[in-house]
Amino acid sequence: MKIPHHLHSHKAILGATGLLILAVIGAVVLRSQGAAPPATLPAPAPVSVAAALEQRVTEWDEFSGRVEAIDRVEIRPQVSGQIVAVHFEEGQLVKQGDLLFTIDPRPFQAVLAGAEAGQSAAEAQLALAQTAVNRSRHLIENHSIAQSELDQDNANLLEADAALKAAQAAVLTAKLNLDYTAITAPISGRVSRAEITVGNLVGVGVTAPVLTTVVSVSPVYVEFDIDEQAFLSYSANGAAGNTGIDRIPVSMGLASEQGYPHQGHLKSIDNELDPTSGTIRVRAVFDNPDGALTPGLFARVRTGGSAAETAVLIDDKAVGTDQDKKYVLIVDHANKATYREVTLGPIVNGLRVVRSGLNQGERIVVDGLQRVRPNDVIAPVLVPMGGDQLASTTP
């Protein structure tokens, strides 16, 4: 039986409509079952990336120390007596020989006068004994006296000479004691407060009181401890046995100062390492013309190698920590971040020295490290490594 043409068209319309209905029903069923259409991949995250630098730098080691005076003298009385004058202000700068205290000199002036009188008497006795000897020698030539008389006169002359020397020593002692009543500064420096004031009696000996102290001002010492590794490094650079230590640069800053503005030189390295702490004592010398480096102040000390060396430098914030390892994320030509373990050195002029694991020019993630995982593809944003932090790097 032959189907009319208009029935064929009606059947086709019904078939297309059925397929559309089935598609709609299927979509509704999928949505009711929680299925979502496939999602598109997110765009790579923009991340700051910089190329590792290579510069000639001097690597510095940092330590903590204290400022110490080169000379420190406790002023004590050398004669007993009453303090009658104090000639300085507390904290004053004094020069060697400046008068600090006066002990009542009158008793010592009297003793000196008596000693000088005794010396005059001894000189007269010596002159008399010498005259007697001369007369006896003349008489013995004429056989007018016995030899024993001449011998006795010679003995008297020797006794008179010894008495004169004793009198001279007594005068010298009296003069010294009188000089000791004027107590002067033995060194130039800054004087402390007067511990004993006017009117008080002072004595001498092991129990003698400290009247005040004087500390030298310029130059000053800064003493600090370095670790065994630094000591071996300095020794390798020719600073063994306190020879060649002038090759090692040293600078220092106080707690209130930025950086290390004071330049000095190493004075000495101790003769043995403390096995308990693994450190050795080092002493540096710094000029202190304005007296700002007061003994006892905390000092931040920086010491370095003898010459500049070539090193790879990166921003310290580009370094990640993986348990006991340090790493950076290398960005390859496909903009994929790759894990790379590195060995680090100290910070020099604001940038971290990389001893191994990274080459000059390799691109690394420097900002947003916490947002990137190894093997992630990123959108690198090139930035300079360290900016102007290397402006003061040793050439």
Image (cartoon, helix red, strand yellow):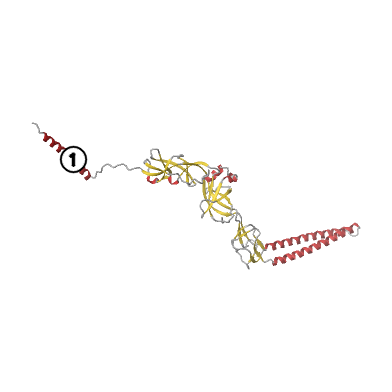
Residue 225 pos. (x, y %): 54, 50
* Number of numbered discs visible in the structure rendering: 1
Residue at image position (19%, 42%) is 24
Residue 363 pos. (x, y %): 42, 41
- Residue 153 visible in image: yes
Judge from the rendering whether residue 395 lies leftward or rightward of residue 383; answer left or right. Answer: right
Instruction: Tell which of 249 and 136 is nearer to you.
Output: 249
Q: Residue furthest front?
A: 6
In which image quadrant can residue 166 be found? bottom right
Residue 82 pos. (x, y %): 65, 67
Looking at the rendered structure, the kind of residue marked 1 is Leu
Instruction: Tell which of 282 and 168 is nearer to you.
Output: 282
Judge from the rendering whether residue 132 lies leftward or rightward of residue 324; answer left or right. Answer: right
Whether 257 is drawn above or below 395: the answer is below
Residue at image position (39%, 46%) is 370
Badge 1 crowding class, 10 Å Cα cut-off, few under 14, some 14 to 19, many 20 or more, is: few
Judge from the rendering whether residue 37 lies leftward or rightward of residue 10; answer left or right. Answer: right
Residue 222 pos. (x, y %): 56, 52
Q: Residue furthest bottom?
A: 199
Q: Secondary structure at mark 1?
A: helix
Q: Identify residue for label 1.
A: 20
Q: Quadrant of the N terminus?
A: top left
Whether 2 is drawn above or below 84: the answer is above
- Residue 323 visible in image: no
Q: Residue furthest left?
A: 1
